[in-house]
Amino acid sequence: MKNNWLPLFITLAIQAMVSLALLTVPVMATVVAQALGVSATLTGVFVAVAYIGAIIASLAAGSAVARFGAIRVSQAGLVFCAAGLALCIVPAPAAFAAGAFLIGLGYGPVTPASSHLLALTTPADRMSLVFSIKQTGVPLGGMLAGAIIPGLVLLGGWQLALAAVAVANVVCALAAQPLRAELDADRQPQRELAFGNLLQPLHLVLSLPVLKRLAAFSFIFSAMQLSLSTYLVTYLHEALEFGLVQAGLALSLAQVGGIVGRIAWGYVSDRWLGARRTLALLAALMAVSTLATALLTTQVPSLLLSSLLIVFGASAIGWNGVYLAEVARRAPAGMASMATGGTLAVTFLGTVLGPALFGAMAAFGGGYRAGFAALAIPTFLACAGLLRKDVPVRASTN
């Protein structure tokens, strides 16, 4: 392809749109909860249902990409997200549950599809940079959610916000269509959809101690990441009396930290610390940040709060690039995509259970402060585990 940056641009846009779709409901959780007559703590259940769909879709993505192509699978993901958002416009808990599952089905295959596409179109000397930039699509979508969703809610209501994001996902799918013929030229239309082999990636991960331990750490980190993205706005709005727009902008600030972190930590890992020490440092920063968040008061200076959120976002949202690169390095030769799919299933499991457990603790164990404080325990344990010498590391740098 003449323009090697075009696949990066479209995959980044797709990743941002599905991330925006996933976080739209959590960002306006207090308003939606009032409309439905339920507790905002059930946001964790919404996210959990979405990631159950994402787990299924990510495990099936390899066969689907081989048959239909990465662009077509990504377009299908965007349409699924749009359909899920449209379903959530119906003010009924059952509609939200079904919508969450559809959004998850759309979210799950996007990362494997974009990785397949970028591996084919990116020169070797740009690989690390391009993949790091692509990974910023998730916090970019979160930043957009925090910045625009509260304003849309105030402008026309929560249903308008859902409709607007659904339309944005469809527009993105249509924008990708002119690239389909060229970028999906490697598809194999006659290839069978081997959905019977969905557990094969998980078997690979669990059979190799190196990948199994990396996946276990990602379970903890993803639970932290989604709990932050899911509950920060509600916590600031309900416990610290922030306005909805102000709380949304605070989430955007954390997501900006994640965008910078995803690129910066990759550089730190490659140049100085190596993957193990970098991930250990990130775990320590997550633990300290979540404890500090639990101790926030209404009198906290804005500069201190902004600094905390940037550090929290840079660590809790910025770890993915270092992790995925290490998985690719540690995978058996020729099996990086399968290893990535298998470890992502474990990662997504953390996003299923983490926010749901956080919500349960908030509802029955002392509020949102208790939820943020409790997150420090597993992340401190992950930090200790990563500092053990028998943890898989890059031999040349650790």
Image (spheres, rainbow, N blue to C red):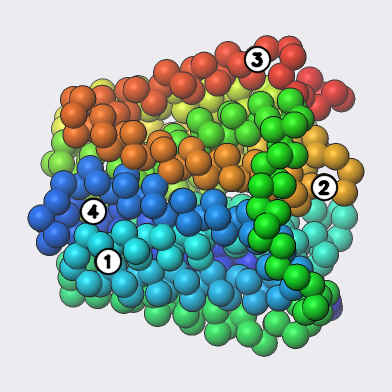
Q: Badges 4 and 2: C-beta atoms under 8 Å apart?
A: no
Q: Residues within 10 Å of mark 1 (few under 14, many from 20)?
A: some
| Viewer-side label of 1, 4 | 1
Which numbered disc, 4 or 2, marks the residue that appears first in the sequence?
A: 4
- Distance, label 2 to label 3, CA atoms, is 27 Å
In the rendered view of the protein, which quadrant contains the N terminus? bottom right
Q: Badges 1 and 3: C-beta atoms under 8 Å apart?
A: no
Q: Secondary structure at mark 3?
A: loop
Frontmost residue, 93 versus 248:
93
Q: Residue furthest front?
A: 196
* Amino acid type for the residue under numbered disc 3: Leu
The mark found on residue 387 in the picture is 3
Asked if one can make out residue 268 in the rendered structure from this viewpoint, the answer is: no
Q: Secondary structure at mark 2?
A: loop
Q: Which residue is mark 1?
A: 95
In the rendered view of the protein, which quadrant contains the C terminus? top right
Q: Position of residue 27 (x, y in %)?
A: 30, 54
- Distance, label 4 to label 2, CA atoms, is 40 Å
Marks counted in the figure total 4
Q: Position of residue 7 (x, y in %)?
A: 71, 70
Q: Badges 1 and 4: C-beta atoms under 8 Å apart?
A: no
* Amino acid type for the residue under numbered disc 2: Met
Frontmost residue, 284 versus 65:
65
Frontmost residue, 191 versus 355:
191
Q: Which residue is mark 2?
A: 335
Q: Position of residue 168 (x, y in %)?
A: 43, 76
| Viewer-side label of 2, 3 | 2
Which numbered disc, 1 or 3, marks the residue that appears first in the sequence?
A: 1
